Image (cartoon, helix red, strand yellow):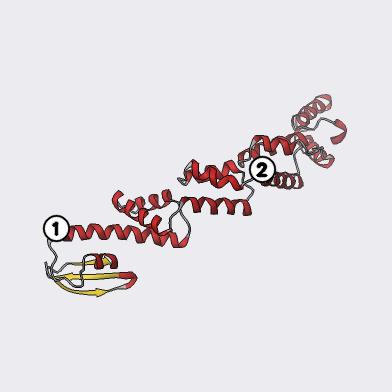
Amino acid sequence: MKIERFKKRHNGLYTIYLDNFNSYDFYEEIILKYELLIRKVIEDEELDKIIKDNKNYESYYEALKVLKRALKTKEEIRNILVEKKYNKDSIDFAITILEKQGYLNDKTYADSYINSSIATTLKGPKKIALELTKKGITKEIIDDALSIYSEQIEKEKIEKVISKKIKTNHSKSAKILKQKLQSDLLNSGFEQNAIMSVLNTVNFVNDGEIAKKEYQKYYKKLSKKYTGKELDYKLKQKMYSLGFTDYNDFN
């Protein structure tokens, strides 16, 4: 097939027009590699190879466009390209080039992600590690990057969570609040030993106003069904279950 003419387009693309009335958009890398601005003829078999090679660069530029908006892991880029129907060879090609150029680096990503999480969130190290694992980061990279998450940092974050929860507690007894804090901190990815070492230094005391408010709430509810000693028993039973054990606090 004879190359009739070409036209330079945006984003490094060239449109090549052939004498069979077909046209193809090729990236500049392909134009240079196959010297398409110099040559006059392309064989059918070679055209198939050029098209396949161009598809590899299309995958690369699609991934690069994503990476210019935000850092991604190799696994995330792979999944994005899979969703866009690129084949494995094109995806592997794109990832290889992006790694060589420094646009794609799981170690850099993990370091950035952990630094950002430490600076802007109250996540524990185990939760951060889980999030990175879901993004396809290997355990070795995660463990190395998490070395900056010191025991002191973890302790300070646990203390912040506890302080915040105590200040905003308007309904829980000291016992229930401590239990809830332990559960919440575990779910936030903090280590059990670190949690307990801090919790055990906090003096949890029942708030009399909270006890009275809860007592009045359940008195209003239970008094519709019970009276006298039975009501008194039901109220005590409920308040004890909520962790309020001193009757004088809420009567």
**Residue 45 circle label:** 1
Q: Residues within 10 Å of mark 1 (few under 14, many from 20)?
A: few
**SS class of the residue under badge 2?**
helix
Q: Quadrant of the N terminus?
A: bottom left
In the rendered structure, which disc, 2 or 1, sits on the residue that comes first in sequence? 1
Q: Residue at x 73, y 35 (%)?
A: 176
Q: Residue at x 45, y 51 (%)?
A: 73
Q: In front here: 170 or 126?
A: 126
Q: Please give left or right for residue 41 compared with residue 232 in the image.
A: left
x, y (%) of residue 24? 22, 66
Q: In front here: 189 or 147?
A: 147
Can residue 180 be seen from the camera position used here?
no
* Residue positioned most to the right: 248
Inspect the image, locate mark 2, and give the three-letter code of the amino acid beneath it.
Answer: Glu
Is residue 45 depicted above or below 210 in this figure? below
x, y (%) of residue 100? 39, 57
The span from disc 2 to disc 1 (Cα, nearest Å) is 62 Å
Can residue 70 be seen from the camera position used here?
yes
Q: Quadrant of residue 37?
A: bottom left
**Residue 151 circle label:** 2
Q: Residue at x 84, y 26 (%)?
A: 228
Q: Quadrant of residue 202?
A: top right
x, y (%) of residue 226? 78, 28
Q: Residue at x 76, y 47 (%)?
A: 167
Q: Quadrant of the C terminus?
A: top right
Is residue 70 depicted above or below 227 in this figure? below
